[in-house]
Amino acid sequence: MTAVSFAAVIGVSVYAVRSGAPEGINLAIPALAHLLAFSAFVVEVVTRSVKLIASAKAVGTYMSFGTALRTSLGGDFAASITPARAGAEPARYLILAQAGMAASDALVVLYLELFLEMISIATVAFLIGMIFDASGTAFVTMVSVVGVYASFVLGVGLLLFLLSRANYGAEPPAWARRLHIHGKRWELVLRWAERIKTTVAAFRKMHYGWASIALLTSIAHVGVRFTILPMLVFAITDAPVPLGPLVVWPLGIIYGAGLLPAPGGGGAVELAFRAALGGTLPAAVFGAALVWWRFYTFYIYIAVGALVAGNTALRAVREVQETEETLEKDP
């Protein structure tokens, strides 16, 4: 599935670039453009790692910068090669477990990161909406993506809270048996229920000073993602290009891609970029802007993530698959 999806990504990219540059394709860009985009990538990764460190301190545990870096990039790599980015959290969880972090601490850190990400995306979206001019469609897309992401994170939090308050016995209740949750499946539920209770309890003892630092770095790492396309475009061409669409549309496209079931987006990201910005970017720079924006917001995370924690991320994905297969065989 991943191979087919990435083949579609490449095919759609070729189509988008060729159709957006009828007078010929030139993907070469100035060295300054590469320097600016790569610097933004470094800042994003570093601030996200600091966010994890501060999140760990907020819940009373420790995480080194190296572990935070591997956790971030390993999760990016696993997310990129799995449907709907489903491999991200298992990979991050396994990396933290291998670093010696307790299961309950790893859970609370990972959920706190998601929760702060939700607040950060909403904050950045609000600021972008206040500062920049863009079409109504762009703002609707941006708000919709923020709403879906917030609904998911808050829904997970509500589910964790409800599970933490429930008392389970050794035997599955009637509702669980009706859902075919018994045997090893029920043992798995019991084991995770205990971890969830510890996780929820940790939130009540959170250090809000460190949580505030984590939030600020979270806003920084989210915001810097939307500087890459403008920096690339303005370093490539001197032609007048409105800034608003270059900032507004990437928010909806980047986070909207996480909702797609196909690994890598299956070409939907490239089509959305073409539909949203094909009329904004000059034809002479459209192809280079699309290819290099996609590289510095997606492909570079795959490459660096594979180098830093690729084996661990793949192991996490395999363990999830093996657990699902074992549960399917459970009578």
Image (cartoon, helix red, strand yellow):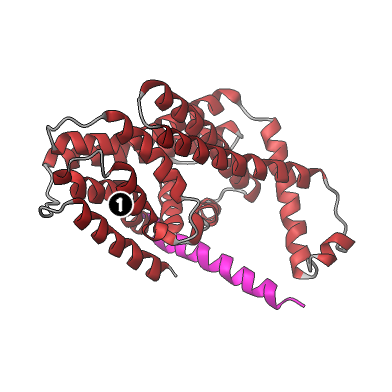
Specify the segment rendered in magenta: 308-331
Vertical position of residue 246 compared to residue 73: above or below: above
Vertical position of residue 294 compared to residue 209: above or below: below
Query: Mark 1 is on which residue type?
Result: Ile
Residue at image coords 64%, 30%:
206
Residue 43 location, x and y as percent?
32, 36
Q: Quadrant of residue 13?
A: bottom left
Quadrant, the N terminus: bottom left
Residue placed under numbered mark 1 in the picture: 300
**Left or right: 1, with 320 as reference point:** left
Residue 154 location, x and y as percent?
64, 39
Comparing 161 with 283, the one in front is 283
Quadrant, the C terminus: bottom right
Residue at image coords 22%, 45%:
289
- Residue 298 magenta-drawn? no
Per the picture, the main secondary structure of the magenta-coloured stretch is helix
**Left or right: 168, with 231 as reference point:** right
Q: Secondary structure at mark 1?
A: helix
**Left or right: 149, with 103 as reference point:** left
Confirm whether residue 11 shows in the render: yes
Comparing 315 with 256, the one in front is 256
Comparing 277 with 13, the one in front is 277
